Image (spheres, rainbow, N blue to C red):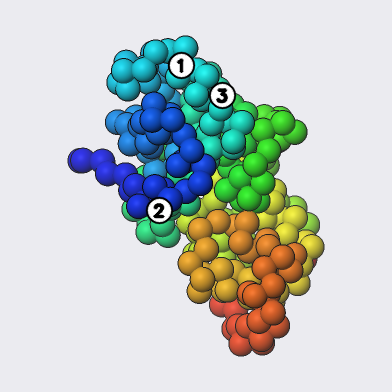
Amino acid sequence: MANYRQIHTKIWKDDWFVELPIPDKLLFIYLFGNDNSNLTGLYKISLRVMAFETGLDADYVTQALKRFEDDKRIVYRDNIIWIVHMWKYHNSASPLVQARIMNDLETIPDVPIKYWYQNYQDTGEFNIETVSIPTLNKSKSKSNNKTNTNDGGGDINDQSPIYLLYTDTFGKPLPMMEKILMEVAIKYPPDKIEAAFKIAGQNGAKSFAYVRAILEDKKNDKSKSIDRVSVEARSHYGDIPQ
């Protein structure tokens, strides 16, 4: 099956991209348009392949990747690259797209860059310093020992109301996301959580960071209506654990 990637026309008016020298423009477009790339923007590729397929010198590619990382556009570690903003332009709630994303992620070993990627999707925070692989391993361990959370304790499982809300809005969460969902379920009232997910869905949000921003009252234009939506919401998920 043929693979296609979107190149948004607004990239040519993006201040950061406009200021790049021509070889950097070529490399950056190549990073999300080459045959190894995928919908997640997280994939394996060697420096040798990048240099060969772009025709750029390997040392130049190395330095360009460092510049891109300094600008928080990509991260490259151990032959795995993460194109930071690619996911938000290709994500979809379509079951087929979600299945493909999950399959692509499963090809990446459990290394720090994979968790940095997921942490960014779920929180909106670009953090490649303090977020570490032990947290990933801990989350995966928890996902293998799921318990019922309706009593207000334990771990999130695939029948937990907040898990179902997340799945309906963004697709199936990765195991490392379950700790974040559990923390949110404990911190906020069930009706507020459901309302936040409803607003996120209505506004076409692409990640859980949008829901969290509503709950933390950071998206004022959306959060003003959260009480009204809470009243309107009629949950068919049951009570969200607190």
The structure residue drawn at horizontal position 51% and vertical position 58%, both measured from the top left corner, is 206
Q: Earlier in the sequence, mark 2 or mark 3?
A: 2
The three-letter code of the residue at mark 1 reads Tyr
Label 3 Cα neighbours within 10 Å, binned few <14 / some 14-19 / many ≥20: some
Can residue 140 be seen by looking at this rendering? no
Residue 128 vs 229, above or below: the answer is above
Q: How far is disc 2 from disc 1 in space, using C-alphas? A: 26 Å
The structure residue drawn at horizontal position 41% and vertical position 57%, both measured from the top left corner, is 92
Q: Considering depth in this image, is 214 or 73 the residue closer to the camera?
A: 73
The structure residue drawn at horizontal position 32% and vertical position 31%, both measured from the top left corner, is 34
- Mark 2–mark 3 contact, CB under 8 Å? no
Q: Position of residue 53 (x, y in %)?
A: 30, 21
- Mark 3–mark 1 contact, CB under 8 Å? no
Residue 103 vs 113, above or below: the answer is below
The structure residue drawn at horizontal position 39% and vertical position 47%, both measured from the top left corner, is 12
Q: Which residue is mark 1?
A: 60
The three-letter code of the residue at mark 3 reads Lys
Label 1 Cα neighbours within 10 Å, binned few <14 / some 14-19 / many ≥20: few
Q: Along the horizontal axis of the image, is 151 left or right of 36?
A: right
Q: Position of residue 91 (x, y in %)?
A: 43, 53
Q: How far is disc 2 from disc 3 in space, using C-alphas? A: 24 Å
Q: Position of residue 79 (x, y in %)?
A: 48, 20
- Mark 2–mark 1 contact, CB under 8 Å? no
Can residue 39 be seen by looking at this rendering? yes
Q: Which residue is mark 2?
A: 10
Q: How far is disc 3 from disc 1 in space, using C-alphas? A: 10 Å
Q: Which residue is mark 3?
A: 66
Residue 109 vs 167, above or below: the answer is above
